[in-house]
Amino acid sequence: MPWASFQMNSMSSKHYTVVDGTLCSCDAVVVNAVDTSMVLLKKFYSGDHDMAVPFIGTQAWIRSLNYSIVDDWRSWHVDGQVAGYTRKYSHNLTFAIVKNAGHTAPEYQPKNCLIMIDRWISHESL
């Protein structure tokens, strides 16, 4: 796969260089990967304190896919405490926000992130 080995373009993080030297939009690759993997479970998550890729930007990107909402916002819990919020979309896509976490959410909330990923892999609801 030519996109598997890429080098970031220093002028814009929205492009990468493919093996043959052509610049392509990362958005097209990601959207194509999401669209063609309808049978796969997909999870995107963001920390609510992420200043590098704020959860609002991830939400906007997901909204641009025009997927319908299957299960609207609700809290998810660990040990009886709110660990974040989640929303499910059509095409097996789930978005979760991890409460009190930054860009590297597992660094800030290791237990909650481990439980979130474990539940996702086990096909359990958050």
Image: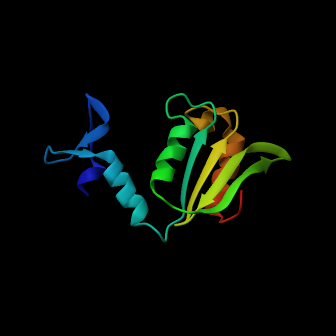
- Which residue extends farthest left? 20
Which residue lies at the image location 26% right of the left edge and 41% below the top edge? 16
Q: How is the image coloured?
A: rainbow
Which residue lies at the image location 66% right of the left edge and 47% below the top edge? 114
Left or right, 40 with respect to 86, comes to left
- What quarter of the picture does the C terminus occupy? bottom right
The answer to whether 20 is drawn above or below residue 125 in the figure is: above
Which residue lies at the image location 38% right of the left edge and 53% below the top edge? 30
Instruction: Specify the quadrant of the image occupied by residue 31.
Output: bottom left
Instruction: Specify the quadrant of the image occupied by residue 110.
Output: top right
Picture coordinates of residue 32, whole percent (x, y):
35, 59
The answer to whether 47 is drawn above or below residue 121 in the figure is: above
- What quarter of the picture does the N terminus occupy? bottom left
- Which residue extends farthest right? 80
Picture coordinates of residue 3, whole percent (x, y):
27, 51
Left or right, 81 with respect to 43, comes to right
Which residue lies at the image location 50% right of the left edge and 45% below the top edge? 60
Residue 117 versus residue 58: which sits nearer the camera? 58
Instruction: Specify the quadrant of the image occupied by residue 123.
Output: bottom right
Picture coordinates of residue 80, whole percent (x, y):
86, 47
Picture coordinates of residue 9, whole percent (x, y):
25, 33
Left or right, 19 with respect to 88, comes to left
Residue 90 versus residue 114: which sits nearer the camera? 90
| Number of dots carrying numbers | 0
The answer to whether 73 is drawn above or below residue 52 in the figure is: below
